Amino acid sequence: MPEKATVRERALQAILDAAVDGVVLIDHRGVIQAFNRSAERLFGYTATEVIGRNVGILMCDADRAHHDRHIARYLATGLPHIIGRGREVMAQRKGGTGFPIFLSVGVLPQRDRPQFLGFIRDLTPEREALAKQQELRERLIPVSRLALVGEIASGIAHEVNQPLAAITNYACQRLLGTSAPDIGEVRSALQEIGSQAARAAEIIRRLRRLARGPDMQREAVSVNAMVSELAELARSEGARYEVHYELDLGADLPPLNIDGGQVQQALLNLLWNAVHALMGSDATPRQVRVRTRLIPERHIEIDVCDNGPGIPAALAARLFEPFFTTKEHGTGLGLAMSRTIAEAHGGTLTYRANAPSGACFVMRLPAD
Ligand code: ADP
């Protein structure tokens, strides 16, 4: 806006400043005429710094090179490039950093010298949210539990087979294979058998340690923030199964001193199980409710309940057994792992039937 702005120009500036989007007005040569407050905030320039300069300073190199050509073509032919459609482009802040925007352009017709109004919406928060969701997804979704079990099983088979083969060898060939083994030979064969059995036990012990996962990285975690983050992810994944999520978050919960990644993984197993159970049910609407609350003795309870078919009483006792599954491609490790995680935090994970139908898994964790 020129120094001595007319009443009309001041009114225009006030309107532009009220807009939430960045607004940039340029003339037919691409020279900036007006720059509103939001644009100042987005680009880091003040209006006085940019008015009178070519709009190219707000663009990344690739777009800058074409921009004057687009305007010239529009003036000559009336053929718009971006006008009336809008598109995503990269803008450039003062200092040269790029950021994604959605740009829509309108024309202010003025005989042969039209002006162009650009409306700019910063896409950075959307992009960051998407990237965060993606990162969470990669971190949490057990890509293929089946593959993991296959790996563990063949690992166990391979590792334990060797000492077992050695034991068989000593027992069958050296002890049973000779008609009258002397006591020295018996002793040495038994010693070998003992040390091979110890080796097998050591392998199993190591595998169990491995299954417990890496050492815990405890930190203060807000349980409601953690559950909300998970629900966001579950919503984006569960939308296609038409599952409705309800969050019932308790007020004033103390922070938990936990390994947030591990506990999220455990809760995610419960959420996927609920979604899976609902897929095969005709409940309407299909519902998963996650509730957090403080219970006596400074424990926090997180329950994940669904209105699916639930679990027959005869099977309920076996739910947490490793390898117990009713799914064709299930591994039966999800609940066992989730319970291990809860217990490693000094907590519990239990099951109860939901009313009138469905399943509830209840995790309790000590707050201190
Ligand atoms: P997997 O999902 O690989 O079968 P899990 O240990 O996670 O392994 O679950 C074990 C079994 O518990 C499932 O196969 C299923 O029969 C039952 N189950 C778990 N959660 C639910 C639920 N929300 N509703 C009904 N059944 C469930």
Image (tube, helix red, strand yellow):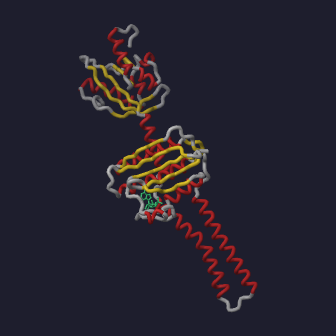
The picture quadrant where one finds residue 34 is top left
Residue 62 visible in rendering: no
State the residue lying farthest toward the right: 184
Q: Is residue 22 left or right of residue 200?
A: left
Q: In which quadrant will I find the N terminus?
A: top left
Q: From the viewer's side, name the closer residue of 147 and 204.
A: 204
Front-most of residues 147 and 246: 246
Which quadrant would residue 62 be assigned to in this image?
Answer: top left
Ligand 1 quadrant in view: bottom left
Q: In the picture shown, does residue 174 fall above or below 76?
A: below
Judge whether 26 appears above or below 365 on screen: above
Residue at the limit of the structure toward the bottom, as seen here: 179
> Tag count in the figure?
0
Quarter assignment of residue 105: top left
Residue drawn at (56%, 68%), measured in percent from left and top? 156
The quadrant the C terminus occupies is top right
Residue 16 appears in view? yes
Decide: is 288 above or below 335. Answer: above
Q: Residue at x 35, y 22 (%)?
A: 30
Residue 187, how many percent across, how many down? 73, 81
Residue sitting nearer the eye, 179 or 265:
265
Is residue 140 placed above or below 7 in the rendered structure?
A: below
Q: Position of residue 232 (x, y in %)?
A: 43, 43
> In the image, what residue occupies the spot 37% across and 28% down?
120
Q: Position of residue 183 (x, y in %)?
A: 75, 86
In percent of width and height, residue 205 lies at 63, 64
The residue depicted at 56 percent of the width and 57 percent of the height is 340
Say whether residue 255 is left or right of residue 90: right
